[in-house]
Amino acid sequence: MDRRESRKLLLRIALAALGLAVVLWGGLALWAWQTYHAARYPGAATIDAGDFVRFAPNFVFRRVETYRSDDPFNLIYNWYSQRFALGPERYATGNCLLMARSSRVFGPLHLNASVMVCDAGPIRMMFVQRTYLLRYPAWLQRWM
């Protein structure tokens, strides 16, 4: 193989690697966008939304959202229950039901999700909190 052919081969490999990197980053960005907006009930009005990030002693990303909808209570309850696999309610107080669960997404990444659905007469209010916790290895925590 002469020098010219080896350069062409190297260029093809570099372009293939770059293309793969772009596809992977694009897929990751799409997954992150969908995860970030996963709590929005279809057709609901956003009242408020906020994020909280902490880096030590473990990485924590918390998203808190409040929505309002005219849909029936049972439709909203079932949608959130199925969307986040929350199961039956944990607590019921007055006209509000709280659903929550903690799970491991993969490896050291954990998700704590809670949804409170309240019946406020002609409207329903939804209070959603999702917390992603990335537990650092013990050897890394000693340096923080």
Image (cartoon, grey):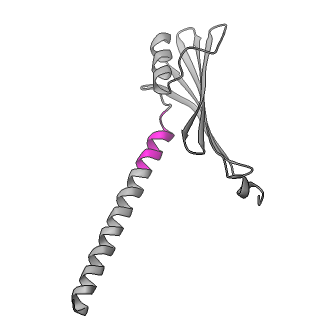
The picture places residue 62, in percent across and down from the top left corner, at 63, 40
Judge whether residue 40 can be spotted in this image: yes
Q: Is residue 83 left or right of residue 127?
A: left
Count of numbered circles on the image: 0
Residue drawn at x 48%, y 10% as measured from the top left:
74
The picture places residue 24, in percent across and down from the top left corner, at 39, 56
Q: Nearer the viewer, residue 33 or 25?
A: 25
Judge whether residue 72 can be spotted in this image: no
Residue drawn at x 74%, y 54% as measured from the top left:
141
- Dominant secondary structure (helix, strand or loop) of the stretch shown in magenta: helix
Q: Which residues are magenta?
A: 29-38
Query: Is residue 117 positioned above or below 65 on the image?
Result: above
Q: Nearer the viewer, residue 2 or 97?
A: 2
Query: Is residue 123 positioned above or below 130 on the image?
Result: above
The quarter of the displayed image where residue 108 is located: top right
Q: Is residue 117 magenta?
A: no
Q: Is residue 30 magenta?
A: yes
Q: Nearer the viewer, residue 69 or 58?
A: 58
The picture places residue 139, in percent across and down from the top left corner, at 72, 57
Residue drawn at x 29%, y 79% as measured from the top left:
11
Q: Is residue 93 left or right of residue 14?
A: right
Query: Is residue 114 positioned above or below 55 on the image?
Result: above
